[in-house]
Image (cartoon, coloured by chain):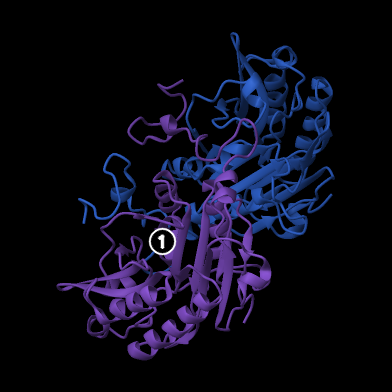
Chain colours: A blue, B purple
Amino acid sequence: MLQRNPAERGFEGPVVACIQMEPHVGAKRENVARSIQYIEEAAKSGASLVVLPELTNTGYVFADREEAFALAEDLPGGETVQAWADAAQRLGVHVVAGIAERDGKRLYNSAIFISPSGRVGVYRKLHLWDREHLFFEPGNRGVPVFDTSLGRISIAICYDGWFPEVYRLAATQGADVVCVPTNWVPMPGQPADRPAMAATLTMAAAHSNGLMIACANRMGTERGQPFIGQSLIVSGDGWPLAGPASCDQEEILYAAIDLQRIRSERTLNTFNHVLRDRRTDVYDPMLGTGWPSSRA
Amino acid sequence: MLQRNPAERGFEGPVVACIQMEPHVGAKRENVARSIQYIEEAAKSGASLVVLPELTNTGYVFADREEAFALAEDLPGGETVQAWADAAQRLGVHVVAGIAERDGKRLYNSAIFISPSGRVGVYRKLHLWDREHLFFEPGNRGVPVFDTSLGRISIAICYDGWFPEVYRLAATQGADVVCVPTNWVPMPGQPADRPAMAATLTMAAAHSNGLMIACANRMGTERGQPFIGQSLIVSGDGWPLAGPASCDQEEILYAAIDLQRIRSERTLNTFNHVLRDRRTDVYDPMLGTGWPSSRA
């Protein structure tokens, strides 16, 4: 395990922990129990916000919709959320974790936000990946931002991070930190000797928006599908504060949540601020673009 | 010089060349003459599209607005465009190059698109960097896409690349290749041992949009301002085809423009396509987001 004790690293103020772990498909009670051991370890080491991977409780590679349906839970009353909420309250931490959500006959690839006081919020993955389309509905709750004592926290899941609009929606709603429960898989064309494209996308989004982004990936191979690990935490200037983690080990990454630093990183010089410099007059799709243009 | 002969590298079909060179502020005739030598060299080596840096003809670090005004030219009739258009026609190449544009009493940090048949288009930098605000007006011609025999070509300049919307506007208008004349400078927080943040932003934009992106940067130090070189050409999967170039040498990068490859790279698997997967229903800023939400 890397960077196990943030206090030893001289962090002051709140700390985020990203748990890189390997859930096993179908083994829900074991997965949740192990995730709570990790939350306890992170809390003991000083974390006030703990991020867990996508679909932490169920695992990822469902054989069919029936298997996913049987493992999913109603939110917020289901047993997994109750267990995580109990841990959050007992340990005084915020938790963001991936979970399979059941809503009547519909399933969502969701992430739950839990505060130590028992507040619960839900994000539903907007951009489904590959065979997820067979099991889940696309998210329909937008990009939420939760106001907390640690800062304003938003959530994206895995392939959502391929869409710069997701981070823009978080940033323009005032988010400071985006938590990313993820199950990153190998991408086509990825050279073996370079950091994952997921890291490149995360760094670019953090830099372009002045956002801290905390990604907790899973590792291991499930039913033939490999996952790439390499969890990481990036600051608002786009550079990693912790990680990328290993490709194949369970471990915890820690980084200080320094709101002054994150917000300062949006200012690049006397004249430039990454969010205020946006040309929304030009981006508006209703107004059109092109050359020669009526806007000339 | 690296990769000087695309034919030796087995390229078939059209080739883009990015010229990394060092203009000198105020020395317009010398800058243009040297740029034409490079266009000739690239054309001899098989290039059909040549990208030159931002403000190739004038240099970058103007002492004041008067100096910029004196060096800028009316478009498309000015002497620099005439010289480049003559070269483009004589050599049978397309040219995209940065130029200081004068329009009445207004100045723009522009890029010119020139076809071998004499077609001329203009892009005006949308996002001004630092002291450019003192000399130039922000662009007012949107993001143009030029239909050519090589594919659909768009343009962005330097700090424009910090705004994912620019690449989205190019991609959603059908661009295949974005040419980026640039004068990248060192960014705050840049670790010495890592690729430039500009490369990270370019790779992310290429991958998220399935766009080939060809960046020609300058190098050298002008009036105390260093430039970082590291020109590069990225394919639609986000990985470099050529470069990053050196930090401090004049050189030419070459890469094949393979439209089938670029367009194929937008499809990630049976279910996913980076452009078609966009959730425009959620992104529309007029509809709002957040949780709990009326869209739930």
- Give the quadrant of the C terminus of chain A: bottom left
**Residue at x-position 33% and y-position 75%:** B85
Chain ID of residue with mark 1: B
Q: Position of residue A63 (x, y in %)?
A: 77, 19
Q: Position of residue A144 (x, y in %)?
A: 49, 33
For residue A55, which quarter of the picture? top right
Picture coordinates of residue B107, whole percent (x, y): 24, 72
- Residue at horizontal 81%, vertical 35%? A22
Nearer-the-camera pick, A72 or B15: B15
Residue most extreme to the top: A104
**In the image: residue A159, left or right of residue A221:** left
Q: Amino acid at mark 1?
A: Ala
Q: Which residue is mark 1?
A: B156
Across and down, in percent, residue B15 comes to: 54, 65
Is residue B189 visible to the viewer in this orientation of the structure? no
Query: Residue A279 vs residue B172: left or right?
Result: left
